[in-house]
Every structure is written in C-alpha cells, then in structure tokens.
Image (tube, rainbow, N blue to C red):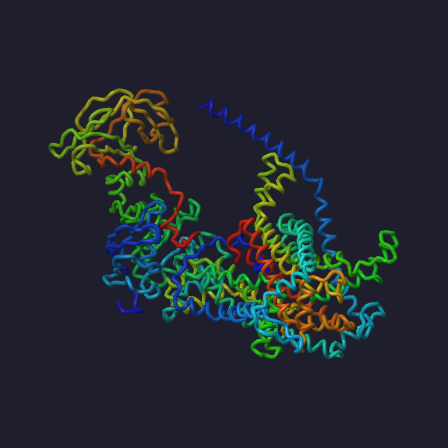
C-alpha cells in the first residue's frame, strides 16, 4: 500500500490506458495541485536564488540588500568546501552500507519467504516499524546506547578494542551509523518492491542452465532488481546529503562532523545570514541534481515518476 | 425510439461508410453492414482485423472517423454510450469487483431508474441459473459463472442490440461448447439482436445465422455459415474458415456455364457461378473433405475432377477422420480428410493415389488467393493493434 | 507406428533420468547457505528494533527531566502524560498539522493523479518533473526556501506556515501512490459502467472512486506519516510553534522528559496494532472468500 509510493520506476502495473484529450476537466483537475506546487515550491526556490545573490547586512538582524553579489558563492565554497565534501562522503557511505545491509533483508522478505504471506507481512511491518517512532528519538536512543556510559562502549573497553579515552559518539563513525540506520527502511522498501516482482522461475532457469547460486544472483537476480536499487539509493542519498540531525552535536555528531545541512541550518536560524545560507542551499541542490542526473542517465531510467 | 424506452425485441443495426483511424494506422478502412433485427450475427476475423474496434464503435466507446451508425433506423453516431440502447458483454467480463453479483446485474436498471430493478435482476440471474450466488462477489465465482453473470447483467436491460466481445475466450473447451448452446437458446428465446465478435471460426459457424469475415479493416465476405464455408470468395476466407486446397491454374475456356482450367496436374472444371474470375490466372479450390482418394486412376465420367498421380507423404489419425497429405508433382501438397468408415487408415504413406471430387464442389478464386491464404494460415498476428485499442498515441 | 512408440519410450526414459539428476543437484546446492540468510535477517531486525525497545523501556524511567540514566521503573509517566504540557501541546500540533495537510494534499494529489493517467496533454514531462522535484530536493533546501519566501512576503511563521509546508511536500507522494492505483484500474470496468447507462458522474462515483479508495487511503496514511515525523522542514517554518519532533529537538539539548517517550511509544503501539489488525482482518476476509 504505502509501499507503492516507493515503488521504483519500471515495475509499475502494465496497463497503458487510453488517454482522452486534455480538456477542461483535465485542467480543472491539474491546476489546483500544480498551482500549489508552483507557489510553494518553485517560488521559494526562486526566492532562494534571489536571496543568494544578496549582500548580508550585518547591521540588522537578518537583513540583506538585493544585489547581484555572486561573490557569495565563492565565499561559501571557500569557507565550507570541507563540509560539502564531508556531506557527500557520509551520504555515499551511508547509501552503500544501507544497500549492503538492506539487500539481503529485502531478498529474504521478497523472495525467500514469498509464499509465507503472514510472516512476510509481519516482517514488512517490522521494517516500517522504526518510522512510527520519531526519528529524532531513534537517533537519541542510539546516542545514549553508544554513549560513553552506555553498554556498547563498556563491552568494547572491557574486551580491549577501545581505549579509556575513545568515544563512539561524536565521531564520523557514529554519524554514518546514524544515517545508515535511519535510511534502512527507505532502502529496503523499494528493493523489496522490486524483488517481490521477481519471477522465481528465472532463478530456477539460471540454475537449470548450470549457473552457480552466486552466478545466478549476479547475472539474473541483481540486474532484474536494478530499478529497486536505483530508487532506494536515490531515496537514501539525497536526503542523507542534506541531513543535519545525525551530525548535530546534540545527537550523534561532534565538533568535526558538521555536514552542509548543519551549516545551512546555523546560517539560517542562528547567525541569520540569509544570503550565504541561500547560496549554500542552491549549491547543495545543484550538486545533487548533477550527481543524480549522471547517475540516472547511467542507470537508464527515464520515467522518474 | 423514445429515450428510456427499450425494445422488447431486437432492432436492426446499420453501419454506413464507417471508417476509423488511430494515430499511425487505420483500424477500419470501409465498413458497410446491415444486421437484421433478431438475428445472431458473428463478426469473425484474426486479431488486428478491426472486429473489436467495430464493436466498440457500435457501443459508443469509440467515435468513428467517418460514417454513420444507425440502430433501429435512428442515427446514434453522436449519442453517448450511456444513452444508446446497446449493451456489451466484455471479453474480460468487467464485473465490478466491489459489488455483489446482484448489484452488478441491477446496475444498468438502477441507472435507468427502472422500477422493480431487483426483481428483474433476479429473473435475469435465474435465466443463467445463477440466482443462488446473487449475494457473492465476482471474485468468488468461477470463470464460467462470471461469464454468465456478465451476460445476465447485459441481457437484463433488454437492449435492442447485444454486443459480445469474444466472451467465451477464457473458458475451457467443454464449458465453451455448453455456453455456445446456451447463448444461442437465450438469443432465440428473448429475441434480441446479438452481435458476436470472435476469432474462433468454429464458434462463429455454430452459433450465428450470419457471419461476416473481417480482415485488415474490411469485410471480406458475408453470408450464412454454410455459404461462407462452401463458397468462399477470397483466399483469406477459404483458409480462415476451415482448410482449403488451393491450386494455381489458367482458365482454358468457359462454355455451357462451366469454366475449364488447366492445372499442372490435370484439367479441372467448375460451375461458372462458383468462380470469382472467368479468364486468365485462377486459383482452383476444393475442401479437403470433398476429396476422394483412389488407388487407381479413375475413368473420367464428366461429373468429377481428377488430379494425380500423387504420393501420400503423411497420414494422421484424428479419431473420426484421417488426414492425408499428398504430393502431386507440379501442384504441391494437397490435404484430404477421409471419414474413418473402417478401422485404421485405408492408405499408407508412400502409396501412389489419385484424388477425385465432384465438379460442383469446386470454387474459383483470383490469382492472389494463395498468398492471402498463407497469411490466414499463419494464425493470429503477433501485434494485436486494432483489437487492443488502449494504445497510447504517444511514445510507448 | 511401432518406431514412433519405441522412440517415445526412449524419450521418457531420458526425461526421467534428467529430472532425477536435477533433483539431486538441487538437494546438494541447497543446504550450504540456507541458515545464513535467516540468521542475518534476525540479527538485522534485532538491531533495527533496539532504539524502539530503548525508547519504550525508558518511558517507564522514573526521571523528571533528564531521561538518560535509569532511575527506576514507574508507571507514573504513562498515567500523567500531560504533566509536561509542552509535550502534549506539541503532540496536538503534530496531529492537527498532519490531519489538515493530509486532507489537502490527498485531495489535490488525487486530482492530479487522475488527470495524469486519464488525459493527454502537452506539458506532460514538465509536469512530471515538477511533481518529482520536491521528492528529490533535500529537506534543508525546501525548508530554507520556504523560510526565505515567508520572510520576503512578510508572513509570520506559525501553524499556518507549517501546514502549508507539509501539504507541499506530501503532495508528490500522494500523486505517486494514487497514480499507481489508477494505473492498475481496469479501464474495461469504467467502459462497462458507461455501457450500462451510467452517466460520467455516476461512473466516477459508483465505480472509479470506490475502486480507487484503497490507494487514496494508502496515500493519506503515507502523507500523515510523513507529516507527523517531519522535522527539518518544520523547524525552518515553525517559528515558535512546536510540533512533536521540533519539541524533541529543542528538548534534546536540555533533557527530554520521559513523557515524550510515552507519547512516542503510544503512537508506535497504536500504529503497529492498527497495521496488524488490518492484516488479520484482510487475511480472514481472504480466507472467507476462498470458501
């Protein structure tokens, strides 16, 4: 049901319906929603763009002059390129780990126990279950479990894998761990949707044609699940790159783990330097669009929606 | 016909100069048809020939690019489907899954605000012997039951014209035969006009009073099943309905109402009215069951055509009959169906035989007939275009 | 004929031995990894659910403000949830925002989905892009953009702006969900409705809409979940108003009272229970239909 929102392109229902010519009714159906999106998505975007060229007025709180001060972009790149790179690096790590962790789970639910409907539905519910606890609380829970006073550190120090001065929280490891954890459902569901539609007879055919299990997986199963892989990685990478909760110092982050999201947030809401905050947002958006564009073109999906 | 008042008996259907094009191809070239009231009419043809498009035009689900549609003399071309006195039994039954059987059947009556809808719906269900499942959902019924509910749902509205879109396609053989008989008896009992669209030639011939064979958006031939079968006028009809032996020949003479033609295996004659061409190249046709196999060359008695000698290359036992395929040098292959009057086959593979048949069983087609026949024999075309109208005109 | 019989017999012998060989092969291949995957999945699920268990456990902690170390078991938090009024107010705001945003987003989104599937029009690919972009944009950017726009217009941030923001980002998800459902609808059903004298309005309300309803409900649920759990965009557009996630973020610095855990756990339990009940009911209905 709700899973279908994350259904990857290419695995949709096969019906191509006959379409009537767009007339007055089509217009009436489309205009309200599209106007809303135009007003509250496109316009803010343009607004952000305009602001990003403004000059910050340090005298007033949140004031800025309208100008074409493209220097903003240079300034923020010079100042914050480490955070940029770090964000994409963390997001990439989180995406890869989430993929590696989620794929067997999705495979298990979608292929192995496909026949056992009750168990399958139960496990699907368990995958979505973390959604029902606010993700902030989830992240906080990990913060406390991984904290210096928590059980994990205790065990690791006892066993000798960690020294008495080492932490887990506040390190890049913790941030990536948090990111990975929070996005596992986003990765699992599209993978599941794709694998659920896999015709198991194809796997049998692979085995029948003398392919080993590993070979069958790489040559048959994985390529067929590619739409799910693409959806899942996009749904993970894009939000992860802009995340700032995990990296925030109140949660799993530390002084050296600030991601670009943290910078934007602080520029916007704390130092109230709107032009620079806007420039950073636009840059983030642009980089993501470029990355996603290359990725999608290489992967070959046309219909994103 | 006043709006809301529907016929107690069937009405004529007339298609005048109908043409239907879709972006990229023409589904129906030119269609002129008159179906008399109260008859069981079959539109027969392979996938993609335009028969389903014709049905949808009559139902009002499509608009013709040109031409008129008249029902009972009234021009309904511009009238929307929900105002036409026509009902359709869909190929996939299209039973509303969220309603019970009885709610499905009474849907049309309720839309027209007919009084006593429930009673009438039960009546219709009784007609198809399914009143006992009235409160079940369609998903709980078998294929055959669903098909009967779809029929009841359409019939209960007493439409002037009932359209059936290959309704028996999804049923197994035995059930299909049973439904064929039931449909025919219901039609006779209720007196509606039935327009039945199918690609199954046996079905069309068994059920219909009149059959029209469609190919590439045109009607190739129209007539009673027997007419069509015994006197096909095109190579397509000759091969699509049953099987035919077709031999190329040249007309030698026409005299005394008889056409004589020379084939590579001998001279044959046929009544002139059974030939489409009277000079030049001609295709000589004869049905396999009309042929007699003889182990010796028969005397020419002027009543029969004889071809041979040929050699039997295949013998297939089919229960009631045996199918022989023979090679006649110069002519190619010929197929013969012989009724098994004795146990086992009479002739064996490799034996030398002659074939003979009565002259009046011959039919003559034009020179292109063999090419058309090959196309018909290939069966359903792989791309079912005209019959699956739900193609997006844009790139897909 | 006799040659045909012998060859058939030979073929069947070959077939039987091939089948036997394949069965033996399958038996040999199966056992090696067949316990590995279930073990992995079990461990993975345990780890996935740890924070939930932790949150749930600590809702019983006898603590006041700082719910970090375990003090003792108490039911007090569950019984006096709103003794910390901020928590309940925030929760109420989340519910309100979720409800309103869901209603608007579902209505607008369903309309768009219907139009997209049923009608042809020229701007199709640009419209698809416009619908896809919000799902692909990082929340930081959306939040910053909206905050920037509200600032420029001069609209005060509050409940209204939160609702506007939530409706916006839920819209695309509704369209995708409902669209999938519309695509799976057999067009023959609506044609049958028209054929059976249903006017276009009758066909829509008596046939199309009831069949779309499961998809619309799914979209509404998705929309509500997204709205309820949203933090980043809300934080940019909420000003002083707090929704539940915002409350937690702000409170994280000074200490989250266990009542927040109570609410979160309660929401979790209700959601799980509802889902499970739904599964059981539809499973029972399915088995009843089979009879």
Which quadrant holds residue A18?
A: bottom left
Q: Nearer the viewer, residue C109 or B274?
A: C109
Q: Quadrant of the N terminus of chain B?
A: bottom left
The picture places residue A102, in percent across and down from the top left corner, at 67, 52
Question: Image check: A283 left or right of A162?
Answer: left
Does residue A129 appear anywhere in the picture?
no
> In the rendered image of this protein, does residue B359 appear above or below residue B388?
above
> In the rendered image of this protein, does residue C161 appear above or below residue A22?
below
User: Which residue in the rendered view is the most extreme toward the left?
Assistant: B256
Residue at 81% over, 68% down: C68
Which quadrant holds residue C51?
A: bottom right
Q: Nearer the viewer, residue A127 or C176?
A: C176
How many numbered circles does the render carry?
0
Question: Image check: B220 left or right of B146?
Answer: left
The picture places residue C7, in percent across and down from the top left corner, at 50, 25
Q: Nearer the viewer, residue B114 or C117?
A: C117
The picture places residue B324, in percent across and down from the top left corner, at 34, 28
> In the rendered image of this protein, does residue A162 appear above or below residue C14?
below
Q: Nearer the viewer, residue C124 or A284?
A: A284
Residue at 24% over, 52% down: B32
């Amino acid at each position: 049901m709700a899973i279908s929102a994350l259904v990857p392109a290419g695995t949709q229902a096969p019906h191509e319906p006959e379409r009537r010519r767009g007339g007055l009714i089509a217009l009436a159906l489309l205009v309200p929603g599209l106007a809303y999106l135009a007003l509250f998505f496109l316009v803010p975007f343009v607004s952000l763009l305009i602001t990003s060229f403004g000059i910050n007025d340090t005298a007033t709180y949140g004031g800025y002059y309208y100008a074409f001060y493209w220097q903003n972009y240079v300034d923020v790149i010079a100042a914050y390129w480490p955070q940029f790179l770090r964000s994409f690096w963390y997001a990439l790590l989180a995406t890869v780990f989430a993929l590696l962790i989620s794929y067997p789970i999705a495979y298990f639910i979608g292929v192995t126990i496909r026949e056992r409907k009750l168990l399958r539905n139960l496990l699907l519910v368990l995958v979505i279950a973390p959604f029902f606890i606010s993700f902030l609380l989830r992240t906080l829970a990990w913060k406390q479990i991984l904290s210096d006073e928590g059980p994990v550190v205790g065990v690791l120090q006892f066993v000798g894998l960690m020294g008495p001065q080492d932490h887990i929280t506040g390190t890049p490891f913790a941030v990536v761990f948090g990111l990975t954890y929070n996005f596992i459902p986003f990765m699992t569901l599209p993978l599941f949707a794709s694998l659920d539609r896999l015709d198991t007879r194809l796997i049998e055919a692979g085995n029948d044609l003398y392919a080993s299990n590993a070979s069958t997986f790489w040559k048959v199963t994985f390529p067929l699940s590619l739409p799910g892989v693409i959806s899942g990685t996009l749904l993970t990478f894009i939000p992860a790159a802009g995340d700032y909760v995990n990296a925030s110092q109140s949660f799993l982050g530390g002084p050296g783990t600030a991601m670009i999201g943290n910078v934007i947030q602080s520029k916007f809401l704390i130092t109230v330097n709107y032009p620079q905050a806007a420039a950073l947002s636009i840059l983030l958006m642009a980089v993501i669009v470029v990355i996603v564009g290359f990725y999608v073109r290489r992967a070959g999906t046309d219909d994103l929606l | 016909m006043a709006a809301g008042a529907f016929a107690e008996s069937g009405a004529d259907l007339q298609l005048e100069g109908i043409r239907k094009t879709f972006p990229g191809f023409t589904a129906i070239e030119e269609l002129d048809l008159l179906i008399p009231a109260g008859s069981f009419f079959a539109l027969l043809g392979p996938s993609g020939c335009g028969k389903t498009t014709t049905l949808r035009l009559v139902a009002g689900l499509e608009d013709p690019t040109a031409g008129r549609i008249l029902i009972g003399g009234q021009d309904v071309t511009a009238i929307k489907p929900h105002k036409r006195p026509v009902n359709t039994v869909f190929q996939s039954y299209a039973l509303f899954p969220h309603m019970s059987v009885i709610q499905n059947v009474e849907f049309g009556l309720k839309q027209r605000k007919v009084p006593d809808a429930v009673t009438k719906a039960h009546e219709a269900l009784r007609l198809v012997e399914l009143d006992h499942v009235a409160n079940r959902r369609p998903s709980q019924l078998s294929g055959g039951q669903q098909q009967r509910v779809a029929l009841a749902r359409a019939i209960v509205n007493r439409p002037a014209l009932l359209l059936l879109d290959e309704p028996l396609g999804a049923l197994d053989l035995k059930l299909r035969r049973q439904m064929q008989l039931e449909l025919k008896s219901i039609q006779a009992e209720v007196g509606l006009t039935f327009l039945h669209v199918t690609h199954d030639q046996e079905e069309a011939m068994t059920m219909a009073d009149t059959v029209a064979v469609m190919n590439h958006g045109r009607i190739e031939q129209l007539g009673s099943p027997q007419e069509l079968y015994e006197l096909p006028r095109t190579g397509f009809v000759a091969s699509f309905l049953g099987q035919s032996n077709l031999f190329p020949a040249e007309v030698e003479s026409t005299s005394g109402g008889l056409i004589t033609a020379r084939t590579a295996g001998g001279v044959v004659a046929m009544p002139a009215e059974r030939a489409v061409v009277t000079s030049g190249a001609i295709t000589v046709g004869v049905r396999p069951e009309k042929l007699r196999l003889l182990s010796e060359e028969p005397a020419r008695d002027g009543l029969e055509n004889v071809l041979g000698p040929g050699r039997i290359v295949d013998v297939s036992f089919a229960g009631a009959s045996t199918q022989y395929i023979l090679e006649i040098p110069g002519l190619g292959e010929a197929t013969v169906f012989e009724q098994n009057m004795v146990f086992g086959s009479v002739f064996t593979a490799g034996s030398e035989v002659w074939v003979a048949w009565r002259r009046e069983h011959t039919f003559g087609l034009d020179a292109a007939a063999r090419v058309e026949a090959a196309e018909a024999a290939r069966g359903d075309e792989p791309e079912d275009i005209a019959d699956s109208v739900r193609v997006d005109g844009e790139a897909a | 004929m006799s040659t045909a019989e012998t060859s058939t017999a030979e073929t069947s012998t070959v077939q039987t031995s091939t089948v036997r060989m394949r069965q033996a092969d399958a038996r040999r291949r199966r056992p090696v990894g067949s316990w590995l995957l279930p073990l992995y999945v079990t461990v993975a699920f345990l780890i996935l659910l740890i924070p939930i268990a932790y949150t749930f456990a600590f809702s019983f902690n006898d603590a006041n403000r700082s719910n970090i170390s375990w003090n003792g078991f108490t039911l007090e938090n569950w019984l006096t949830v709103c003794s910390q009024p901020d928590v309940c107010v925030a929760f109420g705001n989340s519910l309100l925002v979720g409800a309103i945003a869901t209603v608007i987003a579902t209505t607008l989104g369903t309309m768009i989905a219907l139009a997209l599937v049923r009608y042809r029009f020229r701007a199709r690919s640009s419209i698809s892009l416009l619908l896809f972009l919000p799902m692909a944009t990082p929340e930081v950017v959306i939040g910053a953009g909206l905050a920037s726009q509200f600032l420029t217009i001069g609209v005060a941030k509050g409940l209204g702006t939160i609702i506007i923001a939530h409706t916006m980002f839920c819209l695309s998800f509704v369209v995708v969900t409902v669209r999938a459902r519309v695509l799976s609808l057999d067009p023959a059903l609506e044609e049958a409705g028209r054929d059976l004298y249903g006017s276009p309005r009758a066909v829509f309300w008596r046939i199309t809409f009831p069949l779309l309803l499961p998809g619309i409900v799914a979209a509404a649920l998705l929309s509500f979940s997204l709205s309820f759990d949203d933090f980043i965009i809300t934080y940019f557009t909420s000003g002083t108003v707090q929704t539940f996630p915002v409350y937690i973020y702000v409170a994280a610095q000074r200490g989250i009272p266990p009542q927040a855990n109570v609410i979160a756990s309660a929401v979790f339990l209700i959601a799980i229970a509802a889902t499970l009940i739904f599964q059981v009911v539809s499973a029972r209905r399915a088995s009843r239909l089979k009879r």
